Image (tube, rainbow, N blue to C red):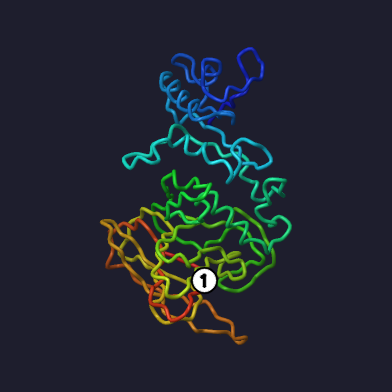
Amino acid sequence: MEIHWYDSMLLDGSVKWQNELNKKNALFLQEGQQRISDAMFMNYWWNADMAEASRDYVEKLGRSPYDLYFGADLSPARNAQRIFERGAWLKALFPSQNDKQTNQAVSSIALFGNDVNFTFTGNKHTKAFSNFRQDEQDYRRFYATETRLFAGDDLNLYSNDDSGKWSGVGRFVPAKSTLTELPFKTSFNTGHGLFKAEQGKVISGRWHDMAQQDILPTWQFAIAGNKATSVFYDFELAYMGGNSLAITSEKSHGISTIPLYESLFSLNNSAELSITYQYSLPNDAVSLWLELDHDKIVNFPLVNSPLSDDDGKNQWFTAKHSLQSYQHNVVTRIGFTVDEHLVDNVAINIGLVEIH
Protein backbone atom coordinates (compact mmCIF):
# COMPACT_ATOMS: atom_id res chain seq x y z
CA MET A 1 0.00 0.00 0.00
CA GLU A 2 1.10 3.55 -0.72
CA ILE A 3 -0.20 6.68 0.99
CA HIS A 4 -0.63 9.77 -1.22
CA TRP A 5 -1.48 13.03 0.51
CA TYR A 6 -3.80 15.49 -1.25
CA ASP A 7 -2.73 19.13 -1.17
CA SER A 8 -5.62 20.60 0.79
CA MET A 9 -5.23 20.78 4.57
CA LEU A 10 -2.68 22.83 6.51
CA LEU A 11 -1.19 21.87 9.88
CA ASP A 12 -3.72 23.98 11.78
CA GLY A 13 -6.54 21.93 10.29
CA SER A 14 -7.74 24.56 7.85
CA VAL A 15 -8.36 23.71 4.20
CA LYS A 16 -6.28 25.92 1.94
CA TRP A 17 -4.97 24.55 -1.33
CA GLN A 18 -1.39 25.53 -2.15
CA ASN A 19 -1.28 24.18 -5.73
CA GLU A 20 2.43 23.61 -5.20
CA LEU A 21 4.80 22.10 -2.67
CA ASN A 22 6.01 24.67 -0.17
CA LYS A 23 6.79 25.06 3.53
CA LYS A 24 3.07 25.09 4.40
CA ASN A 25 2.32 21.58 3.16
CA ALA A 26 5.73 19.87 2.79
CA LEU A 27 5.48 18.34 6.29
CA PHE A 28 2.73 16.08 5.02
CA LEU A 29 5.29 14.56 2.65
CA GLN A 30 8.58 14.68 4.53
CA GLU A 31 9.73 15.86 7.96
CA GLY A 32 13.48 15.91 8.32
CA GLN A 33 14.66 12.37 7.69
CA GLN A 34 11.21 10.90 8.28
CA ARG A 35 9.08 9.91 5.30
CA ILE A 36 5.50 10.93 6.13
CA SER A 37 3.74 9.86 2.93
CA ASP A 38 4.76 8.20 -0.30
CA ALA A 39 3.58 10.95 -2.62
CA MET A 40 1.58 14.15 -2.82
CA PHE A 41 -1.29 14.95 -5.19
CA MET A 42 -1.09 18.64 -6.04
CA ASN A 43 -4.31 20.63 -6.44
CA TYR A 44 -5.22 21.82 -9.92
CA TRP A 45 -4.60 25.58 -9.95
CA TRP A 46 -0.89 25.48 -10.64
CA ASN A 47 1.28 26.84 -13.43
CA ALA A 48 4.71 26.15 -14.93
CA ASP A 49 6.56 28.30 -12.39
CA MET A 50 4.83 26.57 -9.47
CA ALA A 51 5.64 23.14 -10.89
CA GLU A 52 9.32 23.97 -11.28
CA ALA A 53 9.47 25.57 -7.83
CA SER A 54 7.89 22.44 -6.36
CA ARG A 55 10.46 20.25 -8.08
CA ASP A 56 13.29 22.32 -6.62
CA TYR A 57 11.69 22.25 -3.16
CA VAL A 58 11.10 18.49 -3.09
CA GLU A 59 14.65 17.78 -4.20
CA LYS A 60 15.94 19.88 -1.29
CA LEU A 61 13.92 17.57 0.98
CA GLY A 62 15.82 14.62 -0.47
CA ARG A 63 12.79 13.28 -2.32
CA SER A 64 12.18 12.51 -5.98
CA PRO A 65 10.24 15.08 -8.02
CA TYR A 66 8.18 12.12 -9.26
CA ASP A 67 6.74 11.78 -5.77
CA LEU A 68 4.71 14.86 -6.73
CA TYR A 69 1.64 14.23 -8.88
CA PHE A 70 0.35 17.42 -10.45
CA GLY A 71 -3.39 17.11 -10.86
CA ALA A 72 -5.00 17.61 -14.25
CA ASP A 73 -8.77 18.06 -13.97
CA LEU A 74 -9.92 17.09 -17.45
CA SER A 75 -13.60 17.83 -16.98
CA PRO A 76 -15.08 20.35 -19.46
CA ALA A 77 -17.60 21.17 -16.74
CA ARG A 78 -14.81 22.89 -14.82
CA ASN A 79 -12.09 25.30 -15.86
CA ALA A 80 -8.74 23.90 -14.82
CA GLN A 81 -7.14 21.62 -17.43
CA ARG A 82 -10.16 20.97 -19.66
CA ILE A 83 -9.64 17.95 -21.87
CA PHE A 84 -8.67 18.93 -25.44
CA GLU A 85 -9.08 22.65 -24.64
CA ARG A 86 -6.20 23.29 -22.27
CA GLY A 87 -2.77 22.05 -23.37
CA ALA A 88 -0.34 24.45 -21.70
CA TRP A 89 -0.33 22.41 -18.49
CA LEU A 90 1.04 19.35 -20.28
CA LYS A 91 3.86 21.30 -21.90
CA ALA A 92 4.56 22.96 -18.55
CA LEU A 93 5.37 19.56 -17.07
CA PHE A 94 7.63 18.77 -20.03
CA PRO A 95 9.50 22.04 -20.60
CA SER A 96 12.26 20.30 -22.57
CA GLN A 97 9.84 18.79 -25.11
CA ASN A 98 11.51 20.74 -27.91
CA ASP A 99 14.99 19.69 -26.77
CA LYS A 100 16.10 16.74 -28.88
CA GLN A 101 18.55 15.62 -26.21
CA THR A 102 16.09 15.13 -23.38
CA ASN A 103 12.40 15.11 -22.57
CA GLN A 104 12.57 14.86 -18.80
CA ALA A 105 9.36 15.59 -16.93
CA VAL A 106 9.25 18.08 -14.07
CA SER A 107 7.07 15.70 -12.03
CA SER A 108 4.44 13.00 -12.30
CA ILE A 109 0.93 13.56 -13.66
CA ALA A 110 -2.38 12.66 -12.01
CA LEU A 111 -5.23 12.57 -14.54
CA PHE A 112 -8.55 13.36 -12.87
CA GLY A 113 -12.00 13.22 -14.44
CA ASN A 114 -10.97 11.24 -17.52
CA ASP A 115 -14.30 9.42 -17.27
CA VAL A 116 -15.82 12.45 -19.02
CA ASN A 117 -15.68 10.51 -22.27
CA PHE A 118 -18.47 8.38 -20.84
CA THR A 119 -20.25 10.70 -18.40
CA PHE A 120 -20.06 14.21 -19.89
CA THR A 121 -23.25 15.17 -21.75
CA GLY A 122 -22.10 18.53 -23.11
CA ASN A 123 -22.43 22.19 -22.11
CA LYS A 124 -22.42 25.61 -23.76
CA HIS A 125 -18.75 25.50 -24.77
CA THR A 126 -18.11 21.77 -25.31
CA LYS A 127 -20.18 19.14 -27.07
CA ALA A 128 -20.45 15.61 -25.69
CA PHE A 129 -17.65 13.44 -27.02
CA SER A 130 -19.99 10.54 -27.73
CA ASN A 131 -23.40 9.21 -26.83
CA PHE A 132 -21.97 5.80 -25.97
CA ARG A 133 -23.54 5.77 -22.50
CA GLN A 134 -27.03 5.74 -24.05
CA ASP A 135 -26.23 4.33 -27.49
CA GLU A 136 -23.97 1.29 -27.61
CA GLN A 137 -23.69 1.64 -31.39
CA ASP A 138 -21.76 4.89 -30.91
CA TYR A 139 -18.59 3.01 -29.96
CA ARG A 140 -16.46 4.47 -32.79
CA ARG A 141 -16.76 8.01 -31.38
CA PHE A 142 -16.19 6.77 -27.83
CA TYR A 143 -12.95 4.98 -28.68
CA ALA A 144 -11.80 7.79 -30.96
CA THR A 145 -11.97 10.07 -27.92
CA GLU A 146 -9.94 7.56 -25.90
CA THR A 147 -7.35 7.59 -28.69
CA ARG A 148 -7.41 11.38 -28.88
CA LEU A 149 -6.57 11.72 -25.17
CA PHE A 150 -3.27 9.94 -25.72
CA ALA A 151 -2.57 10.47 -29.45
CA GLY A 152 -3.68 14.08 -29.92
CA ASP A 153 -6.09 15.78 -32.29
CA ASP A 154 -4.71 13.90 -35.31
CA LEU A 155 -5.40 10.53 -33.58
CA ASN A 156 -1.94 9.33 -34.61
CA LEU A 157 0.89 8.87 -32.12
CA TYR A 158 3.39 8.40 -34.93
CA SER A 159 3.18 11.98 -36.19
CA ASN A 160 4.09 15.10 -34.23
CA ASP A 161 1.35 17.33 -35.56
CA ASP A 162 1.53 20.59 -33.63
CA SER A 163 -1.21 22.27 -35.62
CA GLY A 164 -3.90 20.98 -33.30
CA LYS A 165 -4.76 22.47 -29.93
CA TRP A 166 -4.31 19.15 -28.14
CA SER A 167 -1.06 17.21 -28.69
CA GLY A 168 -1.88 14.16 -26.54
CA VAL A 169 -0.38 12.66 -23.39
CA GLY A 170 1.29 9.85 -25.35
CA ARG A 171 3.68 12.23 -27.13
CA PHE A 172 5.32 13.07 -23.84
CA VAL A 173 5.36 9.67 -22.14
CA PRO A 174 7.54 6.83 -23.49
CA ALA A 175 5.86 3.53 -24.26
CA LYS A 176 6.13 0.82 -21.63
CA SER A 177 5.04 -2.80 -21.77
CA THR A 178 4.41 -5.75 -19.48
CA LEU A 179 5.02 -8.26 -22.30
CA THR A 180 8.24 -9.80 -21.05
CA GLU A 181 7.63 -13.53 -21.45
CA LEU A 182 5.69 -16.02 -23.53
CA PRO A 183 2.95 -16.94 -24.16
CA PHE A 184 1.59 -13.79 -25.79
CA LYS A 185 -2.06 -13.84 -26.78
CA THR A 186 -4.55 -11.15 -27.68
CA SER A 187 -7.92 -10.91 -29.39
CA PHE A 188 -7.91 -7.13 -28.81
CA ASN A 189 -10.88 -7.77 -26.53
CA THR A 190 -11.84 -4.57 -24.69
CA GLY A 191 -13.92 -6.39 -22.05
CA HIS A 192 -17.42 -5.75 -23.37
CA GLY A 193 -19.49 -6.14 -26.52
CA LEU A 194 -22.79 -6.24 -28.36
CA PHE A 195 -22.35 -10.01 -28.27
CA LYS A 196 -19.77 -12.48 -27.03
CA ALA A 197 -17.86 -14.78 -29.35
CA GLU A 198 -15.76 -17.87 -28.81
CA GLN A 199 -13.62 -19.07 -31.71
CA GLY A 200 -15.76 -17.08 -34.10
CA LYS A 201 -19.11 -18.38 -32.82
CA VAL A 202 -21.57 -16.16 -30.96
CA ILE A 203 -22.25 -17.68 -27.53
CA SER A 204 -24.20 -14.91 -25.80
CA GLY A 205 -25.63 -11.42 -26.18
CA ARG A 206 -24.53 -8.10 -24.65
CA TRP A 207 -21.95 -8.40 -21.92
CA HIS A 208 -19.45 -6.39 -19.84
CA ASP A 209 -16.62 -7.80 -17.74
CA MET A 210 -13.38 -5.80 -17.57
CA ALA A 211 -11.65 -8.77 -15.93
CA GLN A 212 -11.78 -10.45 -19.33
CA GLN A 213 -10.08 -7.59 -21.17
CA ASP A 214 -6.98 -8.56 -23.15
CA ILE A 215 -3.72 -6.65 -23.05
CA LEU A 216 -4.55 -3.93 -25.56
CA PRO A 217 -2.06 -2.37 -28.00
CA THR A 218 0.74 -0.28 -26.55
CA TRP A 219 0.14 2.36 -29.21
CA GLN A 220 -3.53 3.27 -29.70
CA PHE A 221 -2.86 4.06 -32.42
CA ALA A 222 0.26 4.92 -34.41
CA ILE A 223 0.30 4.82 -38.20
CA ALA A 224 3.33 5.67 -40.30
CA GLY A 225 2.90 6.47 -43.98
CA ASN A 226 -0.51 6.17 -45.65
CA LYS A 227 -2.76 8.83 -44.12
CA ALA A 228 -5.81 7.00 -45.48
CA THR A 229 -5.19 4.06 -43.13
CA SER A 230 -7.40 3.67 -40.05
CA VAL A 231 -7.18 1.30 -37.08
CA PHE A 232 -10.10 0.82 -34.70
CA TYR A 233 -11.94 -1.69 -32.51
CA ASP A 234 -14.78 -3.33 -34.46
CA PHE A 235 -17.70 -4.49 -32.31
CA GLU A 236 -19.60 -5.91 -35.27
CA LEU A 237 -17.10 -8.74 -35.74
CA ALA A 238 -15.33 -10.77 -33.06
CA TYR A 239 -13.40 -14.02 -32.88
CA MET A 240 -12.91 -14.16 -29.11
CA GLY A 241 -14.69 -11.76 -26.77
CA GLY A 242 -16.62 -8.73 -27.94
CA ASN A 243 -14.61 -7.18 -30.75
CA SER A 244 -11.77 -7.53 -33.22
CA LEU A 245 -9.15 -5.10 -34.52
CA ALA A 246 -10.08 -3.56 -37.86
CA ILE A 247 -7.59 -2.07 -40.32
CA THR A 248 -8.83 -0.17 -43.36
CA SER A 249 -6.68 1.49 -46.02
CA GLU A 250 -7.29 3.17 -49.35
CA LYS A 251 -5.34 2.12 -52.43
CA SER A 252 -2.61 4.23 -54.05
CA HIS A 253 -1.82 6.20 -50.91
CA GLY A 254 1.46 4.45 -50.16
CA ILE A 255 2.59 1.88 -47.63
CA SER A 256 1.46 2.11 -44.02
CA THR A 257 3.21 0.67 -40.99
CA ILE A 258 1.26 0.11 -37.80
CA PRO A 259 3.22 -0.68 -34.62
CA LEU A 260 0.88 -2.18 -32.03
CA TYR A 261 2.79 -3.77 -29.16
CA GLU A 262 6.09 -3.07 -27.47
CA SER A 263 7.49 -6.26 -25.98
CA LEU A 264 10.60 -7.85 -24.52
CA PHE A 265 10.27 -11.61 -24.67
CA SER A 266 12.68 -14.23 -25.95
CA LEU A 267 11.70 -16.90 -28.47
CA ASN A 268 12.36 -20.52 -27.59
CA ASN A 269 13.01 -23.37 -30.04
CA SER A 270 9.33 -24.34 -30.19
CA ALA A 271 7.86 -20.85 -30.59
CA GLU A 272 5.00 -20.53 -33.06
CA LEU A 273 3.10 -17.53 -34.39
CA SER A 274 -0.63 -17.86 -35.00
CA ILE A 275 -2.78 -15.19 -36.70
CA THR A 276 -6.56 -15.43 -37.08
CA TYR A 277 -8.18 -12.94 -39.44
CA GLN A 278 -10.81 -12.21 -42.08
CA TYR A 279 -10.27 -10.63 -45.47
CA SER A 280 -10.19 -11.47 -49.16
CA LEU A 281 -7.54 -9.65 -51.17
CA PRO A 282 -4.48 -10.48 -53.26
CA ASN A 283 -1.75 -12.20 -51.26
CA ASP A 284 0.81 -10.05 -49.48
CA ALA A 285 -1.42 -6.96 -49.22
CA VAL A 286 -1.17 -7.11 -45.42
CA SER A 287 1.66 -8.52 -43.31
CA LEU A 288 2.22 -9.03 -39.62
CA TRP A 289 5.77 -8.21 -38.62
CA LEU A 290 7.99 -8.86 -35.65
CA GLU A 291 10.87 -6.59 -34.78
CA LEU A 292 13.70 -8.56 -33.21
CA ASP A 293 16.70 -7.30 -31.30
CA HIS A 294 19.30 -5.56 -33.47
CA ASP A 295 16.39 -3.93 -35.40
CA LYS A 296 15.75 -6.97 -37.56
CA ILE A 297 12.25 -7.07 -39.10
CA VAL A 298 10.59 -10.40 -39.98
CA ASN A 299 7.43 -10.23 -42.13
CA PHE A 300 4.62 -12.77 -42.30
CA PRO A 301 2.32 -11.96 -45.25
CA LEU A 302 -1.34 -12.83 -44.77
CA VAL A 303 -2.72 -14.89 -47.62
CA ASN A 304 -6.24 -14.17 -48.85
CA SER A 305 -9.02 -15.96 -46.99
CA PRO A 306 -12.08 -16.27 -49.23
CA LEU A 307 -13.62 -18.98 -47.04
CA SER A 308 -17.32 -18.39 -46.45
CA ASP A 309 -20.10 -20.11 -44.54
CA ASP A 310 -23.48 -21.29 -45.83
CA ASP A 311 -24.78 -17.71 -45.73
CA GLY A 312 -21.91 -16.42 -47.85
CA LYS A 313 -20.27 -14.58 -44.96
CA ASN A 314 -16.50 -14.66 -44.54
CA GLN A 315 -15.15 -17.15 -42.04
CA TRP A 316 -12.15 -16.76 -39.78
CA PHE A 317 -8.88 -18.03 -41.25
CA THR A 318 -5.86 -19.03 -39.14
CA ALA A 319 -2.28 -18.95 -40.41
CA LYS A 320 0.53 -20.52 -38.37
CA HIS A 321 4.27 -19.92 -38.69
CA SER A 322 7.13 -21.66 -36.92
CA LEU A 323 9.57 -19.27 -35.23
CA GLN A 324 12.13 -21.95 -34.53
CA SER A 325 14.76 -20.34 -36.77
CA TYR A 326 14.56 -17.20 -34.61
CA GLN A 327 15.07 -18.93 -31.26
CA HIS A 328 16.91 -16.88 -28.62
CA ASN A 329 15.96 -13.67 -30.46
CA VAL A 330 14.05 -11.08 -28.43
CA VAL A 331 10.82 -9.71 -29.91
CA THR A 332 10.75 -5.96 -29.25
CA ARG A 333 7.74 -4.87 -31.31
CA ILE A 334 4.72 -6.43 -33.03
CA GLY A 335 2.73 -4.72 -35.77
CA PHE A 336 1.17 -4.79 -39.23
CA THR A 337 2.04 -3.37 -42.64
CA VAL A 338 -0.34 -2.57 -45.50
CA ASP A 339 1.26 -2.76 -48.95
CA GLU A 340 1.40 0.32 -51.18
CA HIS A 341 0.64 -1.62 -54.38
CA LEU A 342 -3.07 -2.26 -53.83
CA VAL A 343 -5.59 -3.05 -56.52
CA ASP A 344 -8.44 -2.28 -54.15
CA ASN A 345 -9.10 -0.80 -50.72
CA VAL A 346 -8.15 -2.92 -47.71
CA ALA A 347 -10.58 -3.96 -45.00
CA ILE A 348 -9.23 -6.61 -42.64
CA ASN A 349 -10.24 -7.78 -39.17
CA ILE A 350 -7.67 -9.35 -36.86
CA GLY A 351 -9.34 -11.77 -34.44
CA LEU A 352 -6.35 -13.31 -32.65
CA VAL A 353 -2.58 -12.98 -32.52
CA GLU A 354 -0.72 -15.56 -30.47
CA ILE A 355 2.94 -16.49 -29.91
CA HIS A 356 3.47 -19.52 -27.73
The residue positioned farthest toward the top in the image shown:
12
Examine the rendering and report whether any part of residue 356 can be seen: no
Examine the rendering and report whether any part of residue 79 can be seen: yes
| Left or right side of 205 for 168 | left
Residue 221 vertical placement versus 287 (above, below): above
Q: Which residue is rendered at x = 37% and y = 68% of the image?
A: 272
Q: Which residue is rendered at x = 61% and y = 16% of the image?
A: 10
Q: Name the residue under label 1.
A: 349
Q: Where is residue 76 in the image (x, y as percent from the top left)?
A: 65, 43
| Left or right side of 149 for 301 | left
Residue 282 vertical placement versus 213 (above, below): below
Q: Which residue is rendered at x = 44% and y = 70% of the image?
A: 275
Q: Which residue is rendered at x = 42% and y = 82% of the image?
A: 282
Mark 1 is on which residue type?
Asn
The residue positioned farthest toward the right in the image shown:
134
Quadrant, the C terminus: bottom left
Q: Position of residue 110 (x, y in %)?
A: 54, 36
Give the SS element for disc 1: strand
| Left or right side of 255 for 120 | right
Q: Which of 84 and 113 is in front in this view?
A: 84
Q: Position of residue 354 (x, y in %)?
A: 44, 65
User: Mark 1, residues whose alpha carbon is within 10 Å: few (<14), some, or many (≥20)?
Assistant: many
Name the quadrant containing residue 16.
top right
Question: How many numbered badges does the structure rendering display?
Answer: 1
Q: Position of residue 13 (x, y in %)?
A: 66, 15
Q: Nearer the viewer, residue 211 or 138?
A: 138
